[in-house]
Amino acid sequence: MLKLDKTIDKYTPRISLGAREQLASLCSVETYENESFLTKPHESNQWEYILSKGIARTFLLNTEGEEITLSFFEEHMVLPPYVTRTANGKSILYCQAVTDCEVIRIDAEAFEALMITNIEIRDFGNTVLRLELLHKVNKEIRMASWTAKERLQQFRRDFSMLENLIPHPMIASYLGITNVSLSRLRK
């Protein structure tokens, strides 16, 4: 079923086969090569994304043009929902493949319509939104009140293998520290 089952089970495991099939009927699969973009700010975007293979990230550019990583995504994770990632139908952030990726795309309007008619899919969508909000709030708290060492330790708990798979400057920007500081902390 387009590799949806592991993702659905990660968020709301009690979804029926019928609801899964309805969701699968809206899906298409796209591949993105390492460093390619799923979304860019100011570009039209109408999709919900589920990462079925690979690693992706979201980021913005600061006033000096430096990339600031907002979050990382691993296999079977839902990328930030359309409603949190767009304004007036246009993306407000970059979403980039960090490795070669396979992504399940769902038209956001069709997904919203399915959420209205199917309570199980609504629960899935609402769970994704709640977890996205929780992740953002927890990261804000860590950035404001934790030491760099504590943030690195939490990163390792949240993303146990990423440190060995992705460029360290991306990790450093996610942690709010310089690459040199990350190097020192890792020693």
Image (cartoon, rainbow, N blue to C red):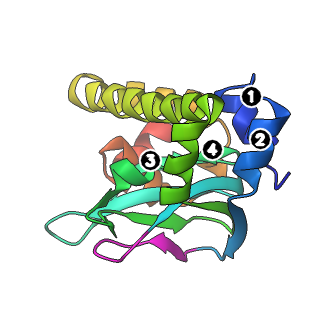
Which mark sits nearer the N-terminus, 4 or 2? 2
Which residue has dot 4 on it?
77
| Mark 3: secondary structure | strand
Q: Is residue 161 above or below residue 101?
A: above
Horizontal side of residue 112 vs 3, given as left or right: left
Q: Which residues are magenta?
A: 35-45
Q: Mark 2: few, some, or many residues within 10 Å (few <14, many ≥20)?
A: some
Disc 4 and disc 3: Cα gap in Å? 12 Å
Which residue has dot 2 on it?
20
Which residue has dot 1 on it?
15
Question: What residue sits 21% from the left and 28% below the top?
Answer: 144
Is 131 included in the stretch rendered in magenta?
no
How many numbered circles are shown?
Answer: 4
Q: Nearer the viewer, residue 153 or 18?
A: 18
Which mark sits nearer the N-terminus, 1 or 2? 1
Tell me the kind of residue under disc 2. Arg
Which mark sits nearer the N-terminus, 1 or 3? 1
Question: What residue sits 29% from the left and 23% below the top?
Answer: 146
Disc 3 and disc 2: Cα gap in Å? 27 Å
Disc 1 and disc 2: Cα gap in Å? 7 Å
Estimate the x, y position of residue 112 in percent, counting from the top left: 49, 48
